[in-house]
Image: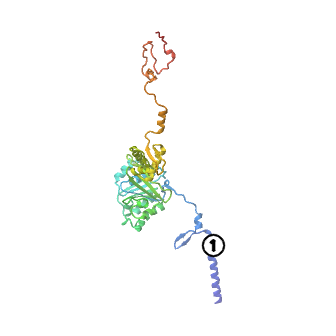
Amino acid sequence: METEIGKTEFDLNVSLDELEKRISRKETEKVPLKIAGIKLTKLSDLFQEPEETTAWLVDGLLPSGGFSVMVAKPKVGKSTNARTLALHIASGKSFLGRDVNQGVVIYLALEEKRSEVKKHFQDMGANGNEEIHIYTGGTPTDAIKQIRHAVESLKPSLLIIDPLFRLTKVKDGNDYIQVTNALDPLLRIARELKTHVLCVHHSPKGQRDGGDSVLGSQAIFGSVDTLLIMKRYEGYRTIQSIQRYGDDLPETILNFDKNTRTVTIGDSREGEDLSRIKQEILVFLGSQNEPATEPLIVKETEGNTALKRKAIRELVSSGEVKRDGKGGRGDPFKYSRILVPDIYVKQEYENPKPTGNPHGCEPYSRTEDFTGVGNKKSENSGKAVPDTKEVITIDDFEVVEVTE
């Protein structure tokens, strides 16, 4: 009995030693610890991993293998912008002034007419040789399965789904869990197959900004790498972005070419509004019989108050508006429009132009007076006057003595 107990104790000690060796070996090899199937990495090991750089489909805007949503109200140009992006990716042309990574494109037009899609690509100048693969029609019952198979086969750089809810068909777009579950397969396609997935989606009614510009659950905004927001104002449209990676694109004017039906990037919205406000201020000041104070200008013109004040100062700086007064309570700044810049008035005053013929001299002949006369005879000498194209010398003229 003692022998058996001793043997048991000896075997137990050996097993503990072996266990310690194994644990030590695992730490040396830096094998990640697994607990219930979850792979855990020690923080110090994580710090030793190489830094990852973001690869871009559209430089600084759409990451490769990312997920993005483009939102706007109806008839703002979402589909137009999405198809412009598709053509530019397939042809390697810059999009919104940014370099692109050329590649294959899959475009799913789930509510657009087939003929309209065809005509739009023709209007944009596509020749048909671009690697763009298009589906038009209703959503198949096994859409996600078919989409994944197409992406695995074609290996596109970009997959466009237009619009999002035509594909997902969630019963309640405001339900966070339903929307999250519907987006998960698309996120997996983007991450696992390294294809950027862009979904066209709607904005809710009313004026909304930021993440609130997305119709439905906040799960959509929370899932995207890039949210593109398009808006329509009187006279122009804009686009801006909210991004997980890179810098956000500030609200910027979109220029729309009616002939090619393409969009290009313009000035910032602030710059556009500032130019418009300047013109409105100039018109207002031009209609006044006396200089106007800044509060009056702000009251009588439309637009953002901060931009109005900025516009006034820039107009003064450029010499288009004159400012009088000391700026105090008893002597406030007053502004008036300068119709003729001071420099021109001063120059004309110092160097007055001669008027009329104060000395009574006869008009003098000019070189162009001879144009086209050819060999016209001189009344006095009877000698032919040479063509003005020839060189005239002193020998061509005859000296005539005049007597009283």
Q: Position of residue 258 (x, y in %)?
A: 37, 47
| Residue 121 drawn above or below residue 148 | above
Q: List the single residue furthest toward the bottom.
A: 1
Q: List the single residue furthest toward the top.
A: 403
Q: Amino acid at mark 1?
A: Ser
Q: Looking at this view, is 307 or 5 the one in front?
A: 307
Q: Quadrant of residue 5?
A: bottom right
**Res 239 seen here:** yes
Helix, strand or loop under label 1:
helix
Circle 1 residue: 24
> For the image shown, how many numbered marks are present on the structure?
1
Q: Is residue 378 left or right of residue 2?
A: left
| Residue 391 drawn above or below residue 224 | above
Q: Looking at this view, is 353 or 269 the one in front?
A: 353
Residue displayed at 50% across by 58% down: 245
Q: Position of residue 24 (x, y in %)?
A: 63, 73
Q: Quadrant of residue 355?
A: top left
Q: List the single residue furthest toward the front.
A: 330
Q: Quadrant of the N terminus?
A: bottom right
| Residue 296 drawn above or below residue 181 | above
